[in-house]
Amino acid sequence: MTVIDISPSVMQFLLAFIVVGPLLGAVAALLPAPPGLKGRNPDQAVLRHGVTVTGAVLIAAIVLAVGFDHDHPATMQATTDISWIPALDVRIHLGIDGISLPLLVLTALLTFLCALYSYFKPPAGPSPKAFVALVLVLESGTLATFAVLDLLLFFLAFEMVLIPMYFLINRWGGDQRQAAAWKFILYTLLGSVVMLLGLLLIGLKSGTFDMVALATDNGRGLTTSVQVIAVLAIGLGLAVKTPMWPLHSWLPDAHTAAPTVGSVLLAGVLLKMGTYGFVRILLPAAPDGMRTFAPYLAAFAVVGIVYGSLACLALARTGAKGDLKRLIAYSSVGHMGFVLLGIATMTPTGVNGALFANIAHGLITGLLFFLVGAVKDRYGTADLDTLAGATGAALYGRAPRLGALLAFAAVASLGLPGLAGFWGEMLTLFGAYSPAEGLSRPAFRTFMAIGAFGTLLTAAYMLIVVRRVCMGEHALPARTTPATTPAPSAASAPDAPQAPATPGPPQTPDTTPALATTPAPAASPTPGTLQAPTTPGAPQAPPAPQLADVQPYEAAAWTPLVALTVLAGLWPAVLLGLTDPAVQKLLSGGKS
């Protein structure tokens, strides 16, 4: 069934435009703007250009999804297959199925929302020209990763995103941005070198680099030893990008230093490239090798789930001076652990859960980084102790809509039923309960139990974050004077100007200018602190100054993520109806 009947040639053009369009837009962004399109200034013109290009790509992705044949999601559609390097049998082979289509639309959506957000709030740093060009190159590489069906093209697209993200962190990031950018590029490049060797091994030994042909062959043309080596090499490169514990250490630094839109794209899009490679390449092309390493992959996955949660709990505790962006980054390590656990089960249930969790993580964590960026812009810091301790009523009292959105994203991230985060984790745990034939059930049920414990830890740290950031710290009651002692006057308040201690006539009001215009009140609290009154009926602390609440451009950027989080939670069949037939075919060796 297709919502709109679109001819195959138009579908081919749409997919090619989605992949190539951002790259052409990046080149155009570096050129001088035509006189009639400059707007108020050149910076505004290039930011508007970014919104236009990413918006056109998003429209094309939506039309592609509407024209997709939902009755046959396991079939590659909108395919283009052109010989590129005949000597190596490398072809420009593009196509989408039920696995890649949701990731394609998610990438187009998040990039457009980032461009829209940046138009109204340009990142602090060098000229926006380079910023817009880098974001468009990043989008092109990510979209190509999900659309290409040739191993070498996959590698080129996989590597294409590294340089743009490096410069986004290094030039527009915050504190420690250079060290974080170097760590990001070194980890991912070293992983990619090993991955290239594995891809070449599969292509040369099987006689083809075509991913559809490799999936159909289902590893029959490769010996078990070749599959084991290939899975080890390719898996290491993919695990770095995912990121899998213990290869994750570049991620918290990169997220903490990256600008807001960089964090959104890194968490919402780039991390999905690694897990997509496991599903698209390793599961169908090297099933015996995957079966060998599946228990180890699952073990690393559940360690990552617990480790990420414990790290978040450590950052969230009072006095830890934890950074909220860093906490959300560590939460990604745990959430992607669920994705890897689902892949390691090698069952349709587990893999569908992994793909669902991929999309849910992109929506929810993308929203979280948008919100944390907004909080940091308003307070000037993302330090949890500062946010919780020095804000009086905190977000609920100072910016209630922003606080409500942060609470919503937090409960969605912890897997509340009815929201998108629930289904992926549940299906992953179900898959671990009954893994594929040949895998140890006791071991995977142990992994399931550890993963379920990780969900409790996730709920704990997310609720702590909501309590501290949205509600503020509960101040200790101030010491009260005994009942027999009169309430202190303004002159005896600790922070008030002191009157002379010698007995005599009362001082004139001019001797205490701060209190001259008012009757002597009880001790005034220090501005910005929350104290209990010393006596019943004493005046309360003045309300904390209001912050700017959700702005119209922020609402425009965040509302689609909120709506899709609710839609995916209440109607999971929309996504599972696409992925399940494609996963069934992938795991059965190309048989529908």
Image (cartoon, grey):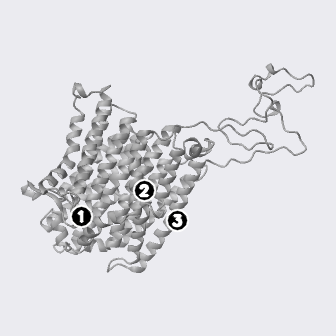
Looking at the rendered structure, which numbered label has been put on residue 70? Answer: 1
Q: Residue 317 location in percent, x, y? A: 58, 53
The kind of residue on which mark 3 rests is Leu
Q: Which image quadrant is residue 334 in?
A: bottom left
Looking at the rendered structure, which numbered label has been put on residue 332? Answer: 2
Of labels 2 and 1, the one closer to you: 1
Q: Cα distance, mark 2 to mark 1?
A: 31 Å
Q: Residue at x 91, y 22 (%)?
A: 505
- Residue 17 in sight in this render: yes
Q: Which image quadrant is residue 50 in?
A: top left
Query: Who comes first in sequence, dot 2 or dot 1?
Result: 1
Q: Residue 78 location in percent, x, y? A: 16, 57
Q: Is residue 166 left or right of residue 246?
A: left
Q: Residue 268 location in percent, x, y? A: 36, 52
Q: Is residue 77 left or right of residue 579?
A: left
Which residue is denoted by mark 3 in the rendering? 456
Q: Camera-side residue: 342 or 561?
A: 561
User: Eyeballing the image, is 140 above or below 495?
Assistant: below
Q: Are marks 2 and 1 in contact (CB under 8 Å)?
A: no
Q: Cα distance, mark 1 to mark 3?
A: 36 Å
Q: Secondary structure at mark 1?
A: loop
- Residue 346 in sight in this render: no
Judged from this view, the residue extending furthest toward the left is: 86
Q: Is residue 32 left or right of residue 446?
A: left
Q: Secondary structure at mark 2?
A: helix
Local crowd size for mark 3, using a 10 Å CA cut-off: few (<14), some (14–19), many (≥20): some
The kind of residue on which mark 2 rests is Ser
Q: Secondary structure at mark 3?
A: helix
Q: Is residue 220 left or right of residue 549?
A: left
